[in-house]
Image (spheres, rainbow, N blue to C red):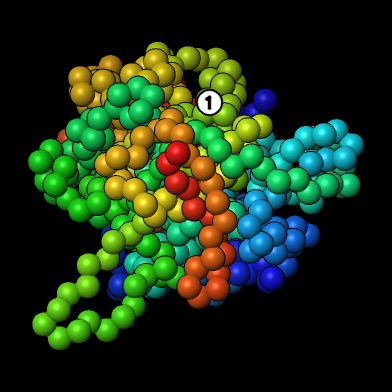
Amino acid sequence: MKKVGIVGIGHGKFGVRSDASIRELAFEAVKGCLEDAAISLSEVDSMVTGVAGDEFSFGIQPSAQVHDYIGFHPKPNYRVEAACATGSAALRTGWMNIVSGLADVVLVVGVEKMTEVPTSIATEIMGRAGDAIWEYPFGTTFPGYYAMIANAHMAEYGTTEEQLAMVSVKNHYYGSLNPYAQMQKEITLERALTSFTVAYPLKLYDCSLITDGAAAVLLASEERAKAISKKPIWIAGLGCGTDSMRLGDRRSLTSLQATREAAKAAYKMAGVGPSDIDIATVHDCFTIAEIVAYEDLGFCERGEGGKLIEAKETYVGGRIPVNVDGGLKSKGHPLGATGISMAIEIAKQLRGEAGPRQVKDPEIGLTHNVGGSGQVSFIHIFRRD
Amino acid sequence: MEFKNFSLFISQTKVNRFATDLAEGRILSTICKKCGKQYYPPRADCPSCMGIEMEWKEIKTEGKLLTFTRIHVPPEHFAVRQPLMPFSSVQFEPCPIGILEVEGGLPVMGWIPKMDIKKIRVGMRMKASPFTLPDGKITIVLEAI
């Protein structure tokens, strides 16, 4: 199979970006990405745009807004969507473009402008990403779905609210070191534990943020990658798995089948196992989701995720550093951009350019990005030369 | 009975009889006539055998609680929007929800209006019942047994 590498990365500032529209946010990331790769847009064959929701930014065809504003037409571009995993779905589509031979150099852009609507409306839009017929009439929200996963996990394995809060403390600590993060401040365990309840038992500091932001990567075929970049980061494995729309239909409420299936495929394709991963970014839309991800990715046994964070094994210097860019929790979660942002953090770490958050000499990194409450999951494994 | 009285947003489905029966006090599932697989929530089509002939059947309403939560920050549709009385405050007390597993492994979502969240436990025995709200909407409640 053809090799595909990341040869350029561009990351806009995440946050409440009331200064910019969706197309302007995308431009920031694309400009950064092209500058990082030191090539011009005319050398790019094709583009993929990831945007999760039309409803946040008042206007369908968000991908056309983006290609129009960066001046990419008339070359190929269209939108890819997979809820909160939209960015990773776009990256996978970009990879397919190159492996299929349709293109040699592909720009993958992920962007979301979520604060154009009030928080309550954003909450409603995201709540409808569950089952709009059979769950939404019970007032379900995204925190609500993960709260139900948390209560099941706590009942089955004895995971504690303190362990959930420890994930938040870690991710805020690393967010404080990431200039692109929405919240650049550390928090204490006590502050996390005493914040108000959003969906029992999840509190404010267990929840990721509503964020505006964009991120872009440039992918290239092996030959072009070597010509463009001194340090291409190779995509070594890809996995995608799915599960039922409704939580109640799942065989387990304490694990995501979509992630387990995606992990199996990605590890097999890359020819590695969980113990080979030096650095990971996982989908911590809620603190419980990071703990479940540790288990589903094989970083620890089922039910041991709480203990893994308690032992600080997912800090830099621990057994497997996770979300040392601040994660969705502190860096922010602009749905379409999140998966691309995860890949950028891994690329930076493998290039050795992560500054104060740098993990010592990593060779293999993994991204894990979940759509909805686990209806779809994407995993990518990256390696450096 | 309009399906929207249960679903709030979606009005057009092949299983809209569900709402009518719910209003009359029955929680219905569907069973595939070809392969016998039972579905709750009800489906018009069977993904197990691609059958499209279904029959309706009441579910057993007693079971054990799979999980639960209480949502304090509700979606806009459910948000309390009432003017505050001068010198007063309105305390928003959200109602817990849960998923009950009844006979056949069927998951039934419902409101848990009569329990303190601290007393709700995964695995507890509960019963699901249809419930008509003051505004005429119909829903499902779960109660401890």
Q: Is residue B85 positioned above or below A154 on the image?
A: below
Instruction: Quadrant for residue B82, please give it.
Output: bottom left
State the residue in front, A117 or A77.
A117
State the residue in front, A269 or A155.
A155
Instruction: Quadrant for residue A258, please give it.
Output: top right
> Dot 1 surroundings within 10 Å: few (below 14), some, or many (20 or more)?
many
The chain identifier of the residue carrying mark 1 reads A
Q: Is residue A108 positioned above or below B139 on the image?
A: above
Q: Please indicate whether residue A169 sits to the left or right of residue A131 in the image.
A: left
Residue type marked 1: Arg
Q: Please indicate whether residue A384 sits to the left or right of residue A45 in the image.
A: left
Q: Position of residue B66 (x, y in %)?
A: 47, 35
Q: Name the quadrant of the C terminus of chain A.
A: top left
State the residue in front, A38 or B75.
B75
Q: Position of residue A357 (x, y in %)?
A: 21, 34
Q: Is residue A365 positioned above or below B109 on the image?
A: above
State the residue in front, A158 or A205.
A158
Q: Position of residue A138 (x, y in %)?
A: 48, 57
Q: How many marks?
A: 1
Q: What's the residue at 37%, 70% (across, down)? A: B79
Q: What's the residue at 65%, 29% (across, down)? A: A2
Q: Which residue is mark 1?
A: A260
